[in-house]
Amino acid sequence: MTNASTGKVVVNRVMSLDGYIAGPGHTMDWIFEHMTSATFPEVMAATGAMLIGRGTYEVGKGMSDENPDYDGGAQFVLTHRPPDEPDPHVTFLTCDVEEAVATARRAAGDKNLEILGADVAAQCLRRGLVDEILVYVLPVLLGDGVRFAPPGLDRIDLEPFSNVQSGGVTMLRFHVRKEARSQQGDV
């Protein structure tokens, strides 16, 4: 994906040690027992826009009072069904994922575009649109819930480039190895 922007497309995930990004019933309240927007402020400072799946948006609406000070820039929600009552703080997109990423990247300017939501992230990974994956591993075992990657996602090779700990939270960062991905498709 060619873009004049210097920002990257970053899948941003909070994950339990056993690989879940949401608990049973899509619960995510366990995250705020361990993290706040002040845990890794450099991530928020580097983010210019967020592309969010509809399910994650709905879960997030119910949690907005728990972490109101996270500002990741302009918010875009990719959905097949925009809500009847618009949200003045969100732009709802009904296009394909490539167009949604391009739209959100323009809004991010020279900062990063954060991808949130299991389905939207998987779509972006499948299409080779992701530059980095950032994972916050929290010290909790959930036992069930929404997995980090959905079944059927093909192998994607990653190159670790950073790991930092703040309290009980470990932040892992990976570059997506796009060369290896394109070679795998050529076999």
Image: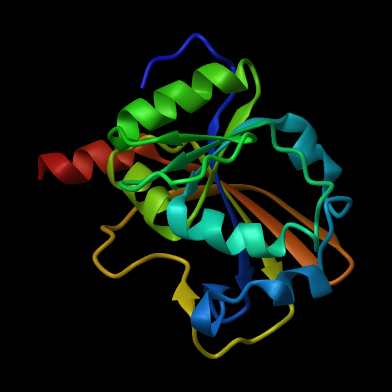
Residue nearer the viewer, 70 or 164: 70
Q: Please say whether residue 166 is visible from this viewpoint.
A: yes
Residue positioned 38% across, 56% down in the render: 119
* Name of the residue lying farthest toward the front: 85
Q: How many marks?
A: 0
Residue under the point 52% across and 40% down? 86
Instruction: Residue at 57%, 64% (x, y): give it.
Output: 59
Residue 50 sits in which quadrant? Answer: top right
**Residue 157 in sight in this render:** no
- Identify the image quadrant of residue 180: top left
| Residue 22 rendering spot, x and y as whole percentages | 56, 73
Q: What residue sits 54% from the left and 91% below the top? A: 143
For the N terminus, give its image quadrant: top left
Q: Is residue 115 above or below residue 136?
A: above
171 sits left or right of 102 in the view: right
Q: Quadrant of residue 58?
A: bottom right
Decide: is 108 above or below 175: above
Q: Residue furthest left?
A: 187
Which quadrant would the C terminus be assigned to in this image?
Answer: top left
Give whichever of 63, 106 is nearer the camera: 63
